[in-house]
Image (cartoon, rainbow, N blue to C red):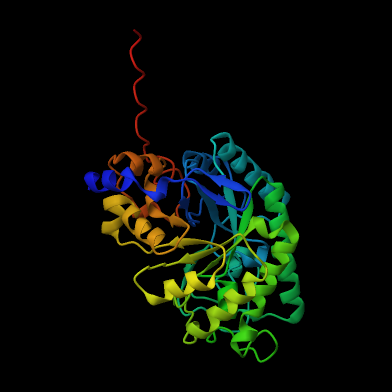
């Protein structure tokens, strides 16, 4: 396994510099946004998170974890927010620590939509339509059955779009280089895209053109708020998680990408990217700008090389940057380990989510520093 990593490192594009808008990236490895439930109960990022991200500052770009733009958008307990002054101050400490360590960060903005619960957020969740999540979810009171969300009114839609724009401005003021609008994984924007969660018959639903409208308007508002060079968008075409179903994905996503391309966000981030499936080539051909590919990796692939081999193949297939998740979780110095062929730490999956301390978060060891040369 070490030999495989050494072979990749010899001439690997993963370690070549790249340009993202006005940012110079030292390598093409992106730390993917990873929900870890380590913020305070009030959504404020603390020193635990500042340490975690600073440890991983050697990534070409860090996309910080899903962060809510308003109170009703909260998904699970201990998810960070960006809608209070205390939350913004907490993120300022995080970005300061990362910048001091030489890193660059975007912040992912996520509204949970129907993935939320009053026991966690204090609010009945909002969604395109009154269609509940089909499975229990983690709440502040433990695992519970979902509640039926309230279908969003026109006023709810407009105020939520404004909340995304406000959150983007707050994030940039807190030291982030930009934000990523989360339109994947069955969350609010994805719920508008999917016909089984968007039953609306008004201008925000029905046809594919109607169902892409909310995502487009959110991205439009965010790009107008902070500039397109500071905005990325994440999608997961045809990925049926959190109960979404997309039978018309082949029709819908070309329409969505065409509309988004007119807004010129700095990147498109494709989750579950697979260069061997024809859909990836279609996305690459349809997207005129930077494309970040985030592969879904088996445990064996993560253990073998952290995803480096898949990353190489995605770059060869047209991706510009490669986002890796679990490899960065277990290896704060993943870039250096892949570059040198050093062994990787074992991932401890029991600490991935819904736990709140440093264990399995900040206690993964980095490589020992090289001993200085002896004085002559």
353 relative position to 163: left or right: left
Residue 274 lies, in percent from the top left, at 38, 68
Q: Nearer the viewer, residue 197 or 230?
A: 230
Which residue is painted at 59% across and 77% down in the image?
256
Q: From what the image shows, is residue 195 above or below residue 289?
A: below
Q: From what the image shows, is residue 356 above or below residue 259?
A: above
Residue 74 lies, in percent from the top left, at 60, 64
Quadrant in the picture for residue 373: top left
Q: From what the image shows, is residue 233 above or below residue 312?
A: below
Q: Number of numbered discs present? A: 0
Quadrant in the picture for residue 302: bottom left
Q: From what the image shows, is residue 240 above or below residue 107?
A: below
Which residue is painted at 60% across and 84% down in the image?
130
224 relative position to 105: left or right: right
User: Quick one: which residue is furthest to the top in this view?
Assistant: 376
Residue 241 lies, in percent from the top left, at 45, 74
Residue 310 lies, in percent from the top left, at 34, 59
Which residue is painted at 61% across and 67% down in the image?
111
Asked whether the viewer can see residue 356, the reply is: yes
Q: Nearer the viewer, residue 348 or 374?
A: 374
240 relative position to 157: left or right: left
Which residue is painted at 56% across and 78% down in the image?
191
């Amino acid at each position: 396994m070490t030999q495989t990593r050494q072979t990749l490192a010899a001439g690997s594009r993963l370690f070549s510099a790249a340009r993202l808008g006005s940012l110079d990236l030292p390598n093409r490895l992106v730390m993917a946004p990873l929900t870890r439930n380590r913020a305070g109960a009030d959504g404020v990022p603390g020193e635990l998170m500042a340490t975690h991200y600073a440890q991983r500052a050697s990534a070409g770009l860090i996309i910080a974890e899903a962060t809510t733009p308003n109170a009703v958008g909260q998904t699970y307990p201990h998810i960070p927010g960006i809608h209070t002054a205390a939350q913004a101050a907490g993120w300022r400490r995080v970005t300061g620590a990362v910048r001091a360590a030489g890193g660059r960060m975007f912040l992912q903005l996520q509204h949970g939509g129907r993935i939320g619960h009053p026991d966690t957020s204090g609010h009945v969740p909002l969604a395109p339509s009154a269609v509940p999540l089909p499975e229990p979810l983690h709440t502040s009171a433990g695992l519970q059955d979902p509640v039926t969300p309230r279908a969003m009114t026109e006023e709810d839609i407009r105020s939520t779009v404004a909340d995304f724009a406000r959150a983007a401005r707050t994030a940039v003021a807190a030291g982030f280089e930009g934000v990523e609008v989360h339109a994947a994984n069955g969350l609010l924007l994805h719920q508008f895209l999917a016909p089984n969660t968007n039953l609306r018959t008004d201008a925000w639903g029905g046809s594919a053109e109607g169902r892409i409208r909310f995502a487009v308007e959110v991205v439009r508002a965010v790009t107008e708020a902070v500039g397109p060079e500071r905005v990325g968008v994440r999608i997961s075409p045809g990925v049926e998680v959190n109960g979404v179903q997309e039978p018309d994905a082949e029709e819908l996503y070309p329409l969505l990408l065409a509309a988004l391309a007119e807004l010129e966000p700095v990147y498109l981030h494709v989750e579950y990217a697979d260069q061997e499936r024809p859909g990836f080539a279609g996305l690459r051909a349809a997207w005129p700008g930077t494309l970040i590919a985030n592969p879904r990796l088996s445990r064996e692939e993560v253990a073998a090389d952290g995803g480096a081999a898949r990353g190489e193949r995605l770059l060869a297939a047209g991706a510009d940057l490669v986002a890796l998740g679990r490899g960065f979780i277990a290896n704060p110095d993943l870039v250096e380990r892949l570059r040198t062929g050093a062994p990787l730490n074992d991932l401890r999956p029991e600490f991935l989510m819904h736990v709140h301390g440093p264990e399995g978060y900040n206690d993964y060891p980095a490589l020992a520093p090289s001993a200085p040369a002896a004085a002559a």
